[in-house]
Image (cartoon, rainbow, N blue to C red):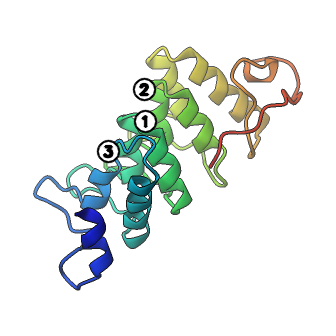
């Protein structure tokens, strides 16, 4: 049904950016779904993301679809949103970013994926002056905190070392390549 509606392209029939009373759009809610391994379902989601504004903010909280996907652990949706141009540095009403959300929840794979995005700024602060690193530390997300510390200390802007490599530990060894490919984008 969703595929049919998206294919019609009728004005006013399928406005993927229109928000409901809670402030969420169809695009934002799609970011919460789990499509599994069905390529056709993911193609519909990607089309939806391309049709709408992936950086729109929920009217009540200011969250973006990327923040929602991260908070619900939907890595496939995070990757799809990033591929459609989601802004990794967008801040919600509290000043939180997607990286802060991933750090607080201990979503190491998502933190790696976000940090690998050009322009991702792990030094941003929320409205209370808290960084992603501080959130990870407060939430006792040690692996995430170590990764953020290494990233901030090295000033690196590209793919990250695997979390179990010596370069991923605070004060750890140099930037030796562990032979693994970076997370897909």
In the picture, the disc for residue 184 is none
The vertical placement of 115 against 30, above or below, is above
Which residue is depicted at the point 37% across and 45% down? 35
Mark before the other along the chain sequence, 3 or 2? 3
Disc 1 is placed on an element classified as: helix
Of circles 1 and 3, which is in front? Answer: 3
Disc 2 is placed on an element classified as: helix
Which residue is depicted at the point 66% across and 39% down? 183
Q: Tell me residue 105's x, y (percent).
A: 42, 26
Q: Tell me residue 87's x, y (percent).
A: 50, 57
Distance, label 3 to label 2, CA atoms, is: 16 Å
List the residue tagged with mark 1. 101
Q: Quadrant of the N terminus?
A: bottom left
From the viewer's perspective, tell me whether residue 52 is left or right of residue 151. Answer: left
From the viewer's perspective, tell me whether residue 84 is left or right of residue 163. Answer: left
List the residue tagged with mark 2. 105
Q: How many residues crowd around disc 3 within 10 Å: few (fewer than 14), some, or many (20 or more)?
A: many
Mark before the other along the chain sequence, 1 or 3? 3
Q: How many residues crowd around disc 2 within 10 Å: few (fewer than 14), some, or many (20 or more)?
A: many
In the picture, the disc for residue 32 is 3
Distance, label 1 to label 3, CA atoms, is: 15 Å
- Name the residue furthest bottom: 11
From the viewer's perspective, tell me whether residue 170 is left or right of residue 37. Answer: right
The vertical placement of 53 against 146, above or below, is below
Are circles 1 and 3 on residues that touch, CB within 8 Å? Answer: no
């Amino acid at each position: 049904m969703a595929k049919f509606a998206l294919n019609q392209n009728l004005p006013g029939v399928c406005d993927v950016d229109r928000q409901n009373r809670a402030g969420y759009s169809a695009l934002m809610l799609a970011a919460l779904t789990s499509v599994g391994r069905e390529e056709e379902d993911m193609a519909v989601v990607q089309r939806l993301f391309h049709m709408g504004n992936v950086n729109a903010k929920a009217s009540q909280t200011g969250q973006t679809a990327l923040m929602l996907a991260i908070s619900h652990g939907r890595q496939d949706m995070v990757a799809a949103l990033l591929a459609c141009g989601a802004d990794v540095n967008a801040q919600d009403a509290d000043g939180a970013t997607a990286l802060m959300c991933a750090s607080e929840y201990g979503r190491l794979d998502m933190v790696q994926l976000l940090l690998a995005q050009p322009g991702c700024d792990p030094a941003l602060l929320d409205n209370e002056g808290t960084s992603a690193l501080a959130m990870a530390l407060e939430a006792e997300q040690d692996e995430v905190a170590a990764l953020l510390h290494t990233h901030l200390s090295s000033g690196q802007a590209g793919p990250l070392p695997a979390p179990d490599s010596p370069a991923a530990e605070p004060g750890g060894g140099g930037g030796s390549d562990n032979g693994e490919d970076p997370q897909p984008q």
